[in-house]
Image (cartoon, rainbow, N blue to C red):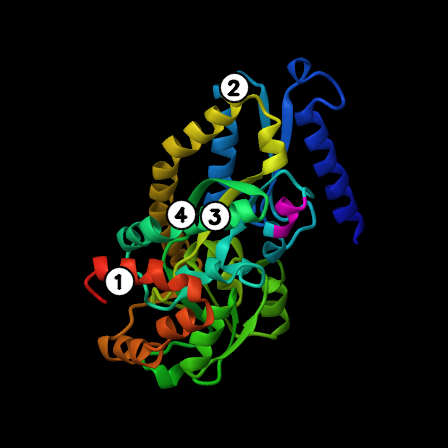
Amino acid sequence: MTMRRRQALMTGAGALAAVGGLAAPAQAQAAKLQLSTVWPDGNFHTVNCKRYAEAVKAATAGAVDIEVKAGGQLGFKGPEHLRAVRDGLVPMADILNVQQVGDEPLLGVEGVPFLCGTQDEVRTLHKYIRPEFEKIAQKNNQTILYMVPWPTQYLHLKVRADTVDGLKGIKIRVPDKNSQDMCNAIGMSAVLIPWGETIAALSSGAVAGVSTSAVSGVDGKFWEFLKFFHATNHQWSCQIVTINNAAFRRLPEQHRKAMQDVAKKMEPEFWASSTKADVDSAKRLTEGGMTKVDIPPAMMAELRKRTANMTADFIKRVPAAEAPLKGYLSEMKRA
């Protein structure tokens, strides 16, 4: 265990003790909870976390004080956050769902290629999958406070591709297995790399492209390495802010209710911020010197054709996905 993780463990234990009143009566001190995220301070998800923390502090008259630890400063990589909250290493985290599939495969369902095409479709999908995500969170000793989708995904590359054949052989960083399977299916060479290692991979030439949002493209200053971002809109994913159940239970009931009420009220605002972040980030990438490539219809049809079996493959691999996906596809009249 690294020094930073030992410190995080001590911090998490201390936070739980403070919440439970082990160090002093709960009425005599604020409950201080650290919230870990790998995204930098300027990322809209981190901004949302800070807005939420401020709103919770106001709603509890300062009794619940959430400190957002951005940029992975507590030492946890993205795929480790579900376990970190589960095990009490940190009281709260902003968890990228598709990176937790090693522990909970169903959390990768949004990453099935072309399952959703718009944020409204993602919202419809959540009618069916969020209850399952809530069960997964409880199984992992935590409670979901809110969920916010990333905006549309792009293929950020050194070269322009107007056909699927133009993507062949490009070594590309991907964040999750579904993205890896998709990129391999269309002839690319996909490598699973956490966000914290992505810029180093670009700098060293280990990869020549990145599958991610325009927001992350700005976070990584992709214009320093890449020239084009292709609007494939191939996958979706969400950040899920959770709290360790032990920490949550030890808060007074009125403070637990306040945290959940604030989350419910602010979640639609956070979704709107995702849409705005995509527009603003695409503009910034262009200003940095990159060119946005709209996918020709023939290329898009070929991308969909080559990945058409991946919904059925996901259900076969993750049987728990069958009922929610069938419900969603039926509502979308795609059953």
First in residue order: circle 2 vs circle 1? 2
Cα gap from disc 1 to disc 4, whole angstroms: 17 Å
Disc 4 crowd rating (10 Å Cα; few below 14, some 14-19, many 20+) is few
Mark 4 sits on what residue? 131
Specify the farthest residue to the left: 333
Residue depicted at 52% across the width and 19% down the height: 60
Depth check, mark 1 against mark 3: the one in front is: 3
State whether residue 115 appears in this view: yes
The image's mark for residue 60 is: 2
Query: Foreground: 245 or 221?
Result: 245
Examine the image and state in which quarter residue 194 appears.
bottom right
Q: Are marks 4 and 3 in contact (CB under 8 Å)?
A: yes
- The circle drawn on residue 329 is 1
Q: Is residue 40 above or below residue 24?
A: below
Q: Is residue 277 left or right of residue 247?
A: left
Q: Which mark is residue 25?
A: none
Q: Position of residue 170 (x, y in %)?
A: 49, 80
Which stretch is magenta? 83-87
User: Can you tell which mark lies on residue 135?
Assistant: 3
Report x, y in % for residue 125: 32, 54
Main SS, magenta region, reads: helix
Q: How busy is the neighbourhood of tag 1: few (under 14 within 10 Å), some, or many (20 plus)?
A: some
For badge 2, the amino acid type reads Thr
